[in-house]
Amino acid sequence: MKEPFFCPNFRKNLSRMILLLLFLAPLLQHAMAADTGTLIISSYPLGAGIYLDDKFIGNATRNIILENVGVGIHYVEWRMEHYNGCVKIISIDQGEIAAAHCDLVPRLGNIKVESDPPGATIILDETTVKGKTNMIVTDILEGPHSVTLRLPNYYDCVLPVAVEEMVTVPVQCNLEEIPTTGTINANSTPPGADVYLDQISLGVSNLKIPKIEPGRHTLSFIKYGYHDWSTTIDVVAAKTYDINAILVLKNGTISLTSNPSDVEIIIDGLNIGKTPYHGEFFQGTHRVLFSSPAGYRNLTTTIIVPYEGTSLAVTLECAAPDAINQAEKDINDNAMFNPGTARGLLQDARNLLASNRCVDAFDMAANASVWAKDIDNDGVPNFQDVWKSIPNIFVYYTPFIIVLFGLIGIAYHRGISQLTPKITIEELPPTDDQERTIRVTTQLKKMPEFFYCAVLIDGKVIDQLDAPGTKDVPLGRLDPGTYTIQVDLDAYRNKLWRNHTEESREIVVP
């Protein structure tokens, strides 16, 4: 048998050569490009800003591969904050793959760290332990940092620091010890109360109580004239508690008497009873009103009620002179009406006042004022009276009386003119030839001057009655069905009082 032109090994090698050519084709294309090459740029640490011929091309977070870079001399610059940058001159030939790398040099400074007390752990930027105070921490990248000092039983001290290249920056901290006890600020309104912690007197408010062992404690405030105030506090170490007790006044006692007695007492608008009075009331300054009975003047005064109590006795002034003066004025104002009765009552009031009969004199003077303003005592002031000698009630009621008698006369006249009509409709048995008849009876209480009565069947008049009495009304022969018989009656003895009535009835024809 004749062998094929291509052997199997030759076919395999040919396939490999084709794949290799496909892989190398892009590189060969770039390498063979006219007047260009490839530049690979890297840095340590990563992240430097890369400038090619003073043009920013990106940050070297990884290797930067620049293709189609023109042949010739180029300047590559690396820039990074807190690092010394570098510049390199790179020559690129046609089709060449060139590389440029820079190890950036950090700008370093030092920190001198001290604490009181010493021996605190130094933690840089919350992550790196650098040793214990007091010491100098070297080779710190310039820029802002934080230094944390940590010592058992002390609060952490965090210090910001700005490191500069080749400079030792000092930082120092006085560590604050973590307290193992609590504190209470014991304040009260008003101040000056005795302060007790767990029944132990500690002084007078306002007061700061330090170094209290953790646990439950009872704080009390006691002040004379005020209700005691206390609370329970669960004290935690290193915590401060602000307590402000609002103290409430206790009631004081008051004793109030008056002459005369049985007078209403109103304190700050609150009615508390009548004199004599003894009881509790709020401490402080209050306005007291003795609301006097008729014949005496009201009295208003101020009273200060302390916790120990107080008393007040008052004598009310007679109000009869005021009433007498008012009666004199009312009599003078109404002198034109000759208020003789009022003058007599006024003189009686003066005599009663001279006899120290205050209430009687007040009442008499008040009556004198009433009679002076209304000499006929009809409830209408003199200036509004129609006739001064006749009580207005008679004048006002006269028209109503006239109308009443008129209505009575009208009712009487209507009563004698009322006829009280009555109608009866009776269906009579039909005759042999089925003729039907109804009997209509009308009755009146009295004989009328006018009488009219109509008989209707299904709304159509079929007969009339000329006078009260009974009349048989023939209906004739009716077809089977239901019919309505109606009787309308009009009558009167007087045209003003017309009497109208009507009656209806249904009849069924089988």
Image (tube, rainbow, N blue to C red):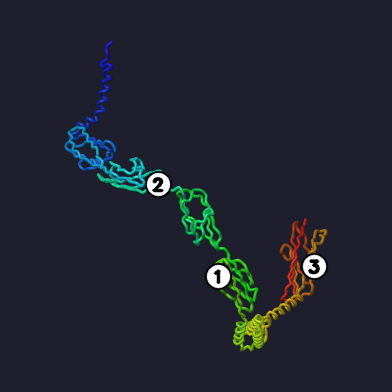
Q: Are marks 2 and 1 in contact (CB under 8 Å)?
A: no
Location of mark 1 (residue) = 304
Crowding at mark 1 (Cα within 10 Å: few <14, some 14-19, many 20+): some
Counting residues from the start of the chain, the first of labels 2 and 1 encountered is 2
Q: Choose top left, top right, bottom left or bottom right for residue 453.
A: bottom right
Q: Can you say whether 248 is above or below 372 in the image?
A: above
Q: Nearer the viewer, mark 3 or mark 2?
A: 2
SS label for mark 3: strand
Q: Is residue 387 visible?
A: no
Element at label 2: loop
Instruction: Give the spatial CA distance, label 1 vs label 3.
Output: 99 Å
- In depth, the one of 321 and 388 nearer the eye is 321
* Circle 2 residue: 155
Which quadrant is the C terminus positioned in? bottom right
Label 2 Cα neighbours within 10 Å, binned few <14 / some 14-19 / many ≥20: some
Residue at the spot of label 3: 441
| Image vertical order of residue 386 relative to residue 112, above or below | below
- What's the amino acid at mark 3? Thr
Q: Secondary structure at mark 1?
A: strand
| Residue 309 x %, y % | 58, 68
Which mark identifies residue 498? none
Circle nearer the N terminus (3, 2): 2
Amino acid type, mark 1: Ile
Residue drawn at point x = 57 percent, y = 63 percent = 250
Q: Amino acid at mark 2?
A: Tyr
